[in-house]
Amino acid sequence: MNREQIDLVQASFARIEPLAEEAGVLFYVKLFEIDPGLRRLFKGKMNEQGLKLMQMISFAVHGLDRIDALVPEIQALGMRHAGYGVEDNHYETVGTALLWTLEEALGDAFTPKTKEAWADVYTFLATAMKDASQKAASQVALQ
């Protein structure tokens, strides 16, 4: 993840932030279309869940400028998600739904470079989340 990619992600997300509720709903519609079994992991109203998702994405996107402070927060999020029943293979599905949502929301502004930047940022963050949840599971198993 380089400076150009961070700039692309931040600039493109700034265009989506005003549409956070709609983007969140789009994301979950696509996520459950790809894997209907994931619906069981979510409690409550999906529009509220969508807003929470967009808030977390906003936190991560704005935190890319201070990655050393962001990573521990993302790792803690990964550990919490493991407790909710999120499995490593779910991250690929989430990434697919996220990229689709960004493409739908941004249209022509979702250029190949922007898509690659988002994919790289998502991979970095998802890897940090998965690594933290695996580490936590290993520590629990050793006790």
Image: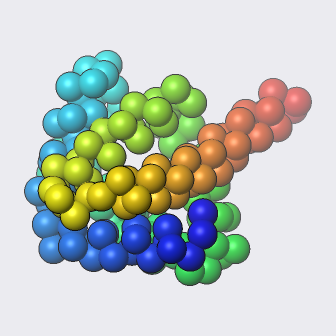
Q: Can see residue 22?
A: yes
The residue that appears at 51% across and 42% down in the rendered structure is: 81
Residue 121, image x, y percentages: 52, 57
Along the line of sight, which residue is nearer the eye, 135 or 20?
20
The residue that appears at 46% across and 33% down in the rendered structure is: 92
Residue that extends furthest to the bottom in the rendered view of this protein? 65
3 w.r.t. 109: above or below:
below
38 w.r.t. 68: above or below:
above
What is the number of callouts on the image? 0
Residue 85, image x, y percentages: 49, 30
Q: Is residue 5 left or right of residue 112?
A: right
Q: Is residue 73 left or right of residue 135?
A: left
Along the line of sight, which residue is nearer the eye, 2 or 70?
2
The residue that appears at 30% across and 69% down in the rendered structure is: 13
Residue 100, image x, y percentages: 26, 43
Q: Can see residue 77?
A: no
Q: Quadrant of residue 29?
A: top left
Q: Quadrant of the N terminus?
A: bottom right
Residue that extends furthest to the right in the rendered view of this protein? 142
Q: Quadrant of residue 39?
A: top left
Along the line of sight, which residue is nearer the eye, 121 or 38?
121
Residue 48, image x, y percentages: 20, 54
Q: Quadrant of the C terminus?
A: top right
Q: Is residue 12 left or right of residue 92?
A: left
The residue that appears at 71% across and 36% down in the rendered structure is: 134
Which of the colour schemes (rainbow, by chain, secondary structure, one colour) is used? rainbow
Residue that extends furthest to the front in the rendered view of this protein? 112
49 w.r.t. 113: above or below:
above
